[in-house]
Amino acid sequence: MDYFHLNASREELLNMSSLGLAHLGDGVFELMVRAWLCLHGKVKVKDLHRATVGYVAAPAQAAAMERLLPLLTDEEADVYRRGRNTAPHSVPRAATRAQYQSATGLEALFGWLYLQGRTDRLNELFDHIMNPQ
């Protein structure tokens, strides 16, 4: 199986938990941030981790999601809401509950898109986060 070029069926996606999608989407989003930072050469190697955390922390992801909401299709918005409405077991100290839930929704959306092999859409949304117009 090629785990970089997936094409999960709608039925498979609907049977996955929101937290499972968010778990995968967290990794997808962080990988994209790391690649963006390296390609843009904006930080020194010793600062890469700190810069990455600045983008992947719940407050930053929640702010990014606010910018993405108007761009989402109805189906994408449903996936986001499903992820956001999942009750968290705990919330990081640096985030509010609302921020954490919004970040979980963003991660679920990125996981969902990744599992469908929709890399063009992932790149479009990610570009909007990193280069707001």
Image (cartoon, grey):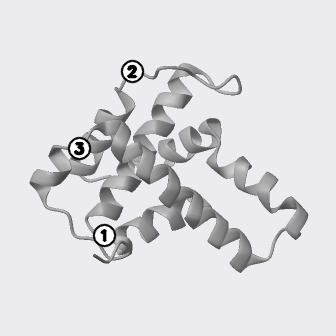
Residue 133 visible in the snapshot: no
Q: Earlier in the sequence, mark 3 or mark 2?
A: 3
Q: Which mark is residue 87?
A: 2
- In the visual, does 10 lie left or right of 117? left
Q: Residue furthest front?
A: 1
Residue topped by disc 3: 16
Residue 22 vs 121, above or below: the answer is above
Whether residue 73 sits left or right of residue 102 in the image: it is left
- Using the image as rendered, state which of residue 129 and residue 92 is in the foreground: 92
In this rendering, which labeled residue sits more in front, label 3 or label 2?
3
For the C terminus, the image quarter is bottom right
C-alpha separation, residue under disc 3 versus residue under disc 2: 16 Å
What residue is shown with label 1?
118
Looking at marks 2 and 1 on the same chain, the residue that comes earlier in the sequence is marked by 2
For numbered disc 1, what is the local secondary structure? loop
Residue 93 in view of the camera: yes
**Which residue is depicted at the point 81% across and 52% down?**
50
Secondary structure of the residue carrying tag 3 is loop
Q: Of the two numbered discs 3 and 1 on the same chain, state the one appearing first in sequence.
A: 3
